[in-house]
Image (cartoon, rainbow, N blue to C red):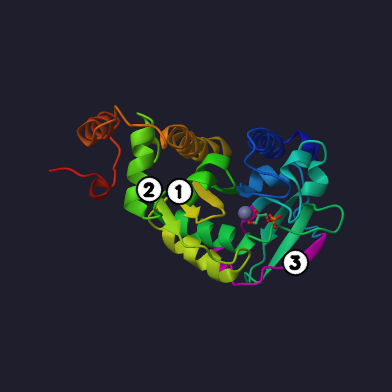
Amino acid sequence: MKDILTSRFVEEMRRTTANMYRLGWDERNGGNISYMLDENEVKEYLDVKKTIREIPTGFNALPLAGKYFIVTGTGKYFKNVDVDPETNLGVLRIASDGETAQLLWGFKDGGKFTSEFPAHMMSHIARLKVNPENRVVMHSHPTNLLAMNFVHELDEKKLTHTLWEMCTECIVVFPDGVGVLPWMLCGTNSIGEATAEKMKEFRVVVWALHGVYGAGRSLDETFGLIETVEKAAQIYMLTAHLPRLNTIKDEDMVKLAELFKVEYRKDFLNLN
Ligand code: 13P
Ligand code: ZN
């Protein structure tokens, strides 16, 4: 059996959480990640018959039965993942009845998966139906996007349009736009269900006055998605109080979307 600390997936989780922390998106225990793993790859590092303990999921995750995930722990700091992955991360499998998570590695101090586990697992279920290659769900508190929540209308079309206007390639990176949920109590099954409902349509979902959810095929892709939305929000926050002299036109966004052959939300543009 190979040392799990040398695995690609632990290495990627260490790097990604460190980057997110460095960018100031994930203060204290803010943010969480779940990353679906391939069983054969997990078997190179762990005896998958050896469950350390069972943790109730708190909802029925039956569509994910038998699936493996590496997940950040609740109350754990992204800042600390790199120095102590075995305490701050866990590898688990969803049991055949979908009611428990079988811990195979990690959460060494007796900890458990993120309090946002329902939102993560329900979002995986929703995204896998849209794209069977989806592997990652990521939650974060990016500074500028959060700041923008306080001064910009939280209407999906208006918010997406403003973000698309801020960087030339935004419409190419998130052509499906940005979904928005009103402020809701986090860590609940209700916010999980609402997030998953939005994830049927969007790969980026803003939790009003809290943060953002992103989904994608890899950690890199999902990180890049949130990074691009955050960059657009940063440009907005740097310029919102200044007179706007120039802007990227809707007709130009259409040209970009056509050049890069992306399916975009035409109803989020104002075309004649
Ligand atoms: P956890 O520490 O439980 O992952 O919660 C952090 C967070 O961002 C809640 O939304
Ligand atoms: Zn949060």
Question: Which quarter is ligand 2 in?
Answer: bottom right
- First along the sequence among labels 2 and 1: 1
On the question of residue 84 being in view, the answer is yes
Please name the residue that numbered disc 2 is placed on: 159
Residue 249: x %, y % from top left: 24, 32
Measured Cα–Cα span from mark 2 to mark 3: 38 Å
Position of the N terminus, as image quadrant, is top right
User: Along the line of sight, which residue is nearer the eye, 171 or 43?
Assistant: 171
Magenta-tinted stretch: 52-68
- Mark nearer the viewer, 2 or 1: 1
Q: What is the secondary structure assignment of the residue under circle 3?
A: strand
Residue 234 lies within the magenta run:
no
What amino acid is at disc 3? Ile
Q: What is the secondary structure assignment of the residue under circle 2?
A: helix
Measured Cα–Cα span from mark 2 to mark 1: 11 Å
The residue shown at (48%, 65%) is 194
For residue 151, the mark is 1
Say whether residue 267 is left or right of residue 53: left
- Quadrant in the picture for residue 74: bottom right
Say whether residue 145 is left or right of residue 174: right
The residue shown at (57%, 54%) is 210
Measured Cα–Cα span from mark 3 to mark 1: 40 Å
Please name the residue that numbered disc 3 is placed on: 55
On the question of residue 216 being in view, the answer is no
